[in-house]
Amino acid sequence: MVIIDLRMPFLDGITTIRALKKMNPDVLIIAMSGSDTSEDKAKARECGVQDFLIKPFTANDLFSVLHRVLAI
């Protein structure tokens, strides 16, 4: 499982997700972003992201998403 920010200083999250999926198509990925745009969510879903967190998020938000993703 990978939890990845879509907006990083030196890496593009979407490009990184595509590379991870190419290495292991079964990898579970949770994306996070401080931007709550439908465009970010759509791009992440198209790349095979299982769930999406909007920053800032609480520990309970994270645990809920982890539970959902691990139940897949």
Image: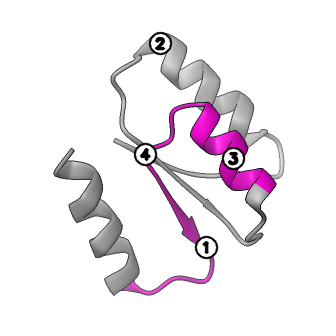
Which residue is pictured at 53% across the width and 12% down the height?
22
Give the mark nearer the N terminus: 3 vs 2: 2
Give the mark nearer the N terminus: 1 vs 3: 3
**Dot 4, crowdedness within 10 Å: few (<14), some or many (≥20)?**
some
**Dot 2, crowdedness within 10 Å: few (<14), some or many (≥20)?**
few
Would you name the residue on which mark 1 appears? 54
Give the mark nearer the N terminus: 3 vs 4: 3
Q: Residue 55: where, in percent of width, then height?
A: 63, 77
Q: Residue 38: where, in percent of width, then height?
A: 75, 60
The image shows a total of numbered marks equal to 4
**What is the quadrant of the N terminus in the image?**
top left
Would you name the residue on which mark 3 appears? 42
Q: Tell me: residue 6, above or below residue 68.
A: above
Give the mark nearer the N terminus: 1 vs 2: 2
What distance separates the C-alpha of mark 1 from that of mark 2? 26 Å
Which residue is pictured at 69% across the width and 46% down the height?
42
Which residue is pictured at 50% across the width and 21% down the height?
21
Q: Tell me: residue 8, above or below residue 24.
A: below
Label for residue 50?
4
> Label 4 sits on what residue type?
Gln
Would you name the residue on which mark 2 appears? 23
Range of residues picked out in magenta: 39-59
Q: Is residue 17 left or right of residue 62?
A: right
Q: Is residue 3 left or right of residue 34?
A: left
> Label 3 sits on what residue type?
Ala
Q: Residue 31: where, in percent of width, then height?
A: 55, 53
In reply to whether residue 5 is colored magenta, the answer given is: no
> Label 1 sits on what residue type?
Ile
Which dot, 1 or 3, sits closer to the camera?
Answer: 3
Q: Secondary structure at mark 3?
A: helix
**What is the quadrant of the C terminus in the image?**
top left
